[in-house]
Amino acid sequence: MDPYNDDDLTLGSILESLPDPVVAALEVRDEWRRQLAESTAGLEFIVSDLARWPVGSVVRVAFLDGDTALHADVAAATAQIADVTNLALDFGVDPATGAHRRWRENETVLQAEIRVSFDMPGYWSLVGTDSTDPTIDPGGPIGGGPGQRSLNLGGYKTNKPQGWEGTVRHEFLHALAFQHEHQNMRGPCSNDFRWDSDPGYVPTTNANGAFVPDAQGRRPGIYTYLAGPPNQWSKAKVDHNLRTVEDPSAVAGPFDPASVMLYRFAPFFYKSSPSPCAPTGQGVDLSDGDKRGLQLLYPAAAEQVDALAAQAMQGLELMGVGAEGVDGPAGPAPAHVERLVELMAAHAASGR
Ligand SMILES: [Zn+2]
């Protein structure tokens, strides 16, 4: 079940989440980045910015399974994104046959930055350049390697859910470095979520084992509800997926209740009704805020590229390295250097 497009999220539905081993691998990497940022003044922007693909680049997409008609549907749904972004999504369509690019699990050379599958449960995607980060490798079918899935649309081969275009856009925005809108640090969601059960709630389950209101009508809170089947999330996992991302350096616009990155939760998830955290959009088309976010991350205008490059230059100077120092063994982590070099190239390309 799609938690996002379902207008009436009923008890017993599954929320979107990356499998635990993948999340664990991400946490190790993020901790490393945090320590790097703390040890290097002024690096915060660059670190948070690392998930973004190079401005103006071509991001290749490939499919593991599914037929050409399904591939074409997915590609068509992403056109709204490509239309407003200084970034090309390349599906590698063969002009003769109409076939889209494919990838295989035994591949050792990267065929595509975004590697789509339809064969695993649920809908999820790695965020931005995590999709090609070889350190994101929990040793399973999902990760940053050339033979690992980075984005999954479960069940699409047999049945595309209602509002499926919105789900495709939601996952592809993750793949282009977007986070969830309910975790926007400027948003109202953390304050309006009903984390705890109503006072005196007596744990009560339905036939499927899902927590439901008790005989007195007292409702389970989010922690209790999600601890039950089918999600069975620990408190840490609930926090990871639903709490606000407290990252002062994260690129975040104002909270946008029309964003396709905002979940529609069941009414019992919220304290107030109507909740300021509840989506106002249909969850299918990109909101104006989503489009502004895309333009912020992947600007087309030269002056915006310049602003990003200026920040990169500043970071480079604070790190005490020049562009000529990028090959030196004593330089900082290669990913950061690549990021700086890319931004400086964008700066140079903008002609200033
Ligand atoms: Zn999501």
Image (cartoon, rainbow, N blue to C red):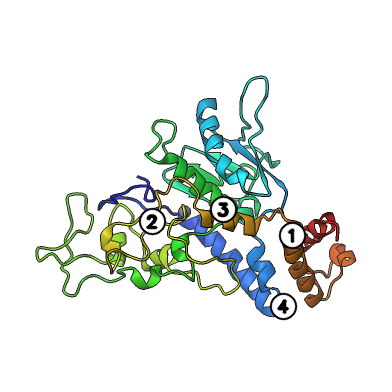
Residue that mark 1 sits on: 305
Residue that mark 3 sits on: 291
Taking the spot 63% from the left edge, 59% from the top edge, the residue there is 296
Look at discs 4 and 2 and give the one toward the viewer.
Answer: 2
Q: Badge 3: few (under 14), some or many (20 or more) residues near its Cα, within 10 Å? A: some
Measured in 3D between alpha carbons, the distance from the residue under mark 2 to the one under mark 1, in whole angstroms, is 32 Å
- The disc, 2 or 3, on the residue closer to the chain's N-terminal end is 2
Look at discs 4 and 3 and give the one toward the viewer.
Answer: 3
Measured in 3D between alpha carbons, the distance from the residue under mark 2 to the one under mark 3, in whole angstroms, is 16 Å
Residue 119 spot, x, y in % from top left: 46, 37
Front-most of residues 14 and 70: 70
Measured in 3D between alpha carbons, the distance from the residue under mark 4 to the one under mark 3, in whole angstroms, is 33 Å
Residue that mark 2 sits on: 280
Measured in 3D between alpha carbons, the distance from the residue under mark 4 to the one under mark 2, in whole angstroms, is 41 Å
Compared across the picture, whether 71 is left or right of 228 comes to right
Residue 174 spot, x, y in % from top left: 54, 53
- The disc, 2 or 1, on the residue closer to the chain's N-terminal end is 2
Compared across the picture, whether 76 is left or right of 4 comes to right
**Contact, CB < 8 Å: mark 3 with mark 1?**
no
Q: Amino acid at mark 1?
A: Val
Q: Badge 1: few (under 14), some or many (20 or more) residues near its Cα, within 10 Å? A: many
Residue that mark 4 sits on: 40
**Badge 1 element:** helix
Q: Amino acid at mark 2?
A: Thr
Q: Amino acid at mark 3?
A: Lys
- The disc, 4 or 2, on the residue closer to the chain's N-terminal end is 4
